[in-house]
Image (cartoon, rainbow, N blue to C red):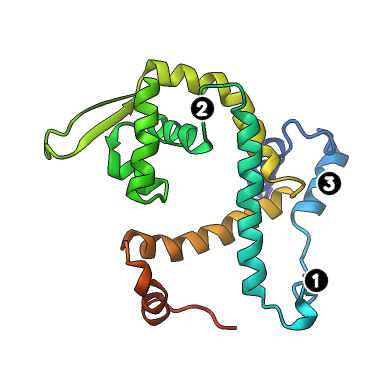
Amino acid sequence: MNYSLLKEIIDLIAQFELATKGESRYPGNKEGFKCWIKDSFRNEDYSVQPKWEGKENGRSPESVISTLIVHMNRYAKAYSKSAIHGSGFSTQDEYIYLINLKAFGEMTKMDLIKKNIHEKPVGIQIINRLIYQGWISQRSSSTDKRSKIIKINSKGLKALEQQMNKIRQATRIVSGNLSYSEKIELIRLLTKLDDYHHPIFCKDLAPAGLLNTVMKDYPINKN
């Protein structure tokens, strides 16, 4: 018996159960498994290019990508706004900061701000709102008296937990009607973009020279 193949099949079934949990379109039987396999691992024909507005007038793929990313950010903010409606949260950034503190533990204010890809003034405003709400505690760093260490406290954990069901709903809605394999491919592509842009962001380059520096020092794919 080919035990390696058997293990791969069992692992695939485990992926199927995880990916289709709560999804009615894939029943938990042989037929549902076959449909999931077909949808998740079908070969994409990349020779067939998608259509986009302005393509016939020379609009570039880069322009479309930039616009769609902006649109997705706005859609996500709308769902997040609904998720926190009626709560003590003012913005999605506030609960994202709390989620990071819960997941990664206490850290300096600047570490939290950088983790959320914010400029310092914006991040400090968010942290100050969380302190005002009584959701995070702060203390002086033992290694650098100029730095403050912050952490989520019991009141913050309670506020976060009260909204987590709606926050998870908003998160699921953002990925919309993508199949499991499409979600994985999107994660791969967005991670590749994040890996490119994050080191640039961390350099905190001045706006005046940012574009020239990136074009000079960080190669882009011009195909």
The residue lying at 29 percent from left, 44 percent from top is 110
The mark found on residue 34 in the picture is: 3
Name the outermost residue toward the right: 31
| Picture layout, residue 162 above or below residue 219 | above
Task: Report, in whole angstroms, how far the alpha carbon at label 3 lies from the one at label 2.
Answer: 43 Å
The residue lying at 41 percent from left, 29 percent from top is 102
Proximity of marks 2 and 1: CB atoms separated by less than 8 Å? no
Estimate the x, y position of residue 97 in percent, counting from the top left.
42, 36
Residue designated by label 2:
89
Residue designated by label 1:
51
Q: Nearer the viewer, residue 119 or 142?
A: 119
Q: Is residue 199 left or right of residue 3?
A: left
**Nearest to viewer (mark 1 / mark 3):** 1
* Amino acid type of the residue tagged 3 in the rendering: Lys
Estimate the x, y position of residue 30 in percent, counting from the top left.
85, 39
Asked which secondary structure carries label 2, the reply is loop
Asked which secondary structure carries label 3, the reply is helix
Proximity of marks 3 and 2: CB atoms separated by less than 8 Å? no
* Amino acid type of the residue tagged 1 in the rendering: Lys
Q: Nearer the viewer, residue 220 or 126?
A: 126
